[in-house]
Image: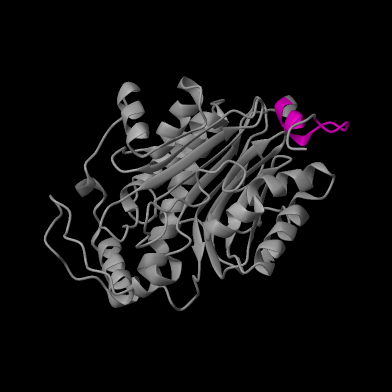
Amino acid sequence: MRANDNRIPGETIMIRTALAAALMSAAAPAALAQDDGGWSIIIHGGAGVIERGQMDADTEAAYREALSGALEAGREILAGGGSAMDAVEQVAWILEDDPLFNAGRGSVYTSEGTVENDASIMRASDMQAGAVGGVMNVRHPISLARAVMEHSPHVMLIADGASAFADEQGLERVDQAFYFTERRWQAMVRAVEAMGLPVPERPEGAPEPEPVREGMLDILDREKRFGTIGVVALDQSGELVAGTTTGGTTAKRWGRVGDTPIIGAGTYAANDCGVSATGTGEYFIRLSVAARICLLSETGLDGQAAADRVMDELTDIEGDGGIVALIGGQPVWSMNTSGMYRASQTHDGEPYVAIFDDE
């Protein structure tokens, strides 16, 4: 397993610019950040079998540029005194609108040829949270999750009920053609054919078929279980927020929902710890991965050590994926895959953008 050691590398890669019972008796790092106006942010765009030599230069550059742009947007909000909640939502918006990532517009298809999004968001100070599952026609699922948290008495809404609530909140709705990308469609076709299932009809309004590079389909096949995007942000007031959003797994069936909208599994924030996960959701659910990391960190275990320990436990039960976190205001990442799209920055550090496990 490759993980960082809470240090932001000096040379960075840039293309463009008791789960909240009480604070520990020692001063929490997040509170220190409030005193000195510090902020920090960490982002992921999914993990998987992402290896050097199996991604062409143009594709790699596109992912790095997208991560850099999203990081810059979050940095501008936080450095300008904006809230962690707004930073998480706005960064997620950017990634949900980018077809490179399996969330929002770039979401994968179910075996029935539809897009079904899941998302969640959580605030550390009061442990308020909102989540949605199986949403088929909301442009920004992260905003719907935030609305559930702020404007409903519930934590999770699903499917048609979530969409009806989106209408009440005035959130932008889209049709299924909005989500269409040829490479995601062809990846689903390949998967359902392998399962011996009928290939669904192309969505109404989708463009005419176009060629997709076979190598890109191979990359998507290796990533298919791991596509998720997530953001954790700490603002100058000391507020910590974590959010995660995803299209799920390619060719998923029976209304499958993974860890992303499950508070404590794919997303968690309490005290000075916030986590967003990406991976085979069924295993993250069983271990309550996100909350488990925060609980271990509250016992006094170093944040990186806490993340690595839980990822080791995930490996032991044959789960795979990765996490990003802010613990004590410091960016932490850990994974048991060969790659994870990720980026981070602190108020006193340089931007960090990486894909492969040896960066």
**How did the renderer colour the structure?**
one colour
Residue that lies at the very extreme toward the front in this rendered image: 254
Q: Position of residue 349 (x, y in %)?
A: 65, 45
Instruction: Give the left or right position of residue 356, taking residue 305 as reference.
Output: left
At a point 34% along the width and 48% down the height, the residue shown is 116
Q: Is residue 220 above or below residue 94?
A: below
In this orientation, does residue 220 appear? yes
Query: Quick one: which residue is furthest to the right in this view?
Result: 25
Percent x, y for residue 81? 57, 25
> Magenta region: which residues?
23-34
Which residue appears at 23% of the width and 62% of the height? 182
| Quarter of image, res 327 | top right
| Quadrant holding the N terminus | bottom right
Q: Where is residue 47 in the image (x, y as percent from the top left)?
A: 51, 62
- Report if residue 216 lies within the magenta region: no
- Residue 19 locus on image (x, y percent): 73, 37
Q: Is residue 29 magenta?
A: yes
User: Is residue 56 visible to the viewer in this orientation of the structure?
Assistant: no
Compared with residue 168, is residue 27 higher up or lower down, i.e. above or below?
A: below
The residue at 37%/62% (across/down) is: 250
Taking the image as shown, residue 352 lies to the left or right of residue 142, namely right
Of residues 354 and 190, the one nearer the viewer is 190
Q: Residue at x 34, y 57 (%)?
A: 108
Quadrant showing the C terminus: bottom right
Instruction: State how many labels appear.
Output: 0
Q: Where on the picture, by quarter, is residue 330?
A: top right
* Residue nearer the viewer, 266 or 52: 266
